[in-house]
Image (spheres, rainbow, N blue to C red):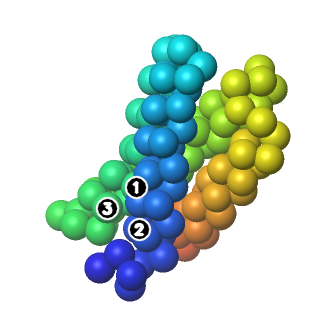
C-alpha cells in the first residue's frame, strides 16, 4: 500500500527521520522539551494520513487529512526552531524542512481538492 501511495510512503520515511532526530536530541544534545514535541507532531503526520486511508466516511477522511496538515505545520515550526537555536545544523535542518514541505504541499493539494468536491 505504501508504494502505491506517495503520501503514506513519504510520511513514513519522514517519521523514521524524526525518530532518529529525537534519539539524537535526547542522547547527544540532552534536549528533552522540543524533542518530545517534534516526535509527537512529526510521527503524527503519517499516522493520521494512514488512518484517513481507512476512514469510515468522507468526513472522517477529511478530518484526518486536516489533522495531518496541521501536524505538518507544527513539525515545520519545531524544525525551524531547532536550526535557529543551534540544536541541529542548517544542512540537516533544511533537508528535513524540505521533506516536511513536500509532504505539506501534498496535503494542501488533497485538502484543497476535498474542499472543492464536498457539497
Q: Are the two marked residues, 3 and 2, in contact with CB atoms closer than 8 angstroms?
A: yes
Is residue 3 shown above or below 35? below
Q: Which residue is more in the foreground, 16 or 81?
A: 16
Name the residue carrying label 3: 50
Q: Quadrant of the N terminus?
A: bottom left
Image point 64% across, 58% down: which residue?
Answer: 99
Q: Which residue is more in the foreground, 93 or 80?
A: 93
Q: Is residue 3 left or right of residue 51?
A: right
- Residue 108 appears in view: no
Q: Quadrant of residue 53?
A: bottom left
**What whole-number distance in Å separates the C-alpha atoms at marks 3 and 2?**
6 Å
- Residue 32 appears in view: yes
Q: Is residue 43 left or right of residue 50?
A: right
Rate crowding at label 3 as few (under 14), some (14 to 19) or many (20 or more) other CA atoms within 10 Å.
Answer: many
Q: Quadrant of the C terminus?
A: bottom left
Q: Which residue is more in the foreground, 66 or 94?
A: 94
Q: Residue furthest front?
A: 28
Image point 39% across, 82% down: which residue?
Answer: 3
Q: Is residue 50 left or right of residue 11?
A: left
- For numbered disc 3, what is the local secondary structure? helix
Q: Are the two marked residues, 3 and 1, in contact with CB atoms closer than 8 angstroms?
A: yes
Mark 3 and mark 2 lie on one chain; the one further toward the N terminus is 2
Q: Quadrant of residue 9?
A: bottom left
Name the residue carrying label 1: 46
Image point 58% across, 36% down: which residue?
Answer: 74
Image point 56% across, 23% down: which residue?
Answer: 28
Name the residue carrying label 2: 8
- For numbered disc 1, what is the local secondary structure? helix
Where is residue 85 drawn, in percent x and y?
Answer: 77, 20
Rate crowding at label 1 as few (under 14), some (14 to 19) or many (20 or more) other CA atoms within 10 Å.
Answer: many
Q: Residue furthest bottom?
A: 4
Amino acid at each position: 500500500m505504501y508504494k502505491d501511495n506517495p503520501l503514506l510512503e513519504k510520511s513514513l520515511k519522514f517519521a523514521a527521520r524524526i525518530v532518529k532526530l529525537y534519539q539524537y536530541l535526547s542522547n547527544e544534545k540532552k534536549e528533552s522539551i522540543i524533542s518530545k514535541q517534534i516526535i509527537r507532531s512529526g510521527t503524527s503526520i503519517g499516522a493520521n494520513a494512514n488512518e484517513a486511508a481507512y476512514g469510515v466516511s468522507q468526513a472522517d477522511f477529511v478530518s484526518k487529512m486536516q489533522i495531518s496538515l496541521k501536524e505538518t505545520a507544527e513539525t515545520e515550526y519545531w524544525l525551524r526552531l531547532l536550526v535557529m537555536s543551534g540544536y541541529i545544523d542548517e544542512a540537516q535542518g533544511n533537508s528535513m524542512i524540505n521533506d516536511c514541505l513536500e509532504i505539506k504541499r501534498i496535503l494542501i493539494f488533497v485538502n484543497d481538492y476535498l474542499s472543492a468536491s464536498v457539497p
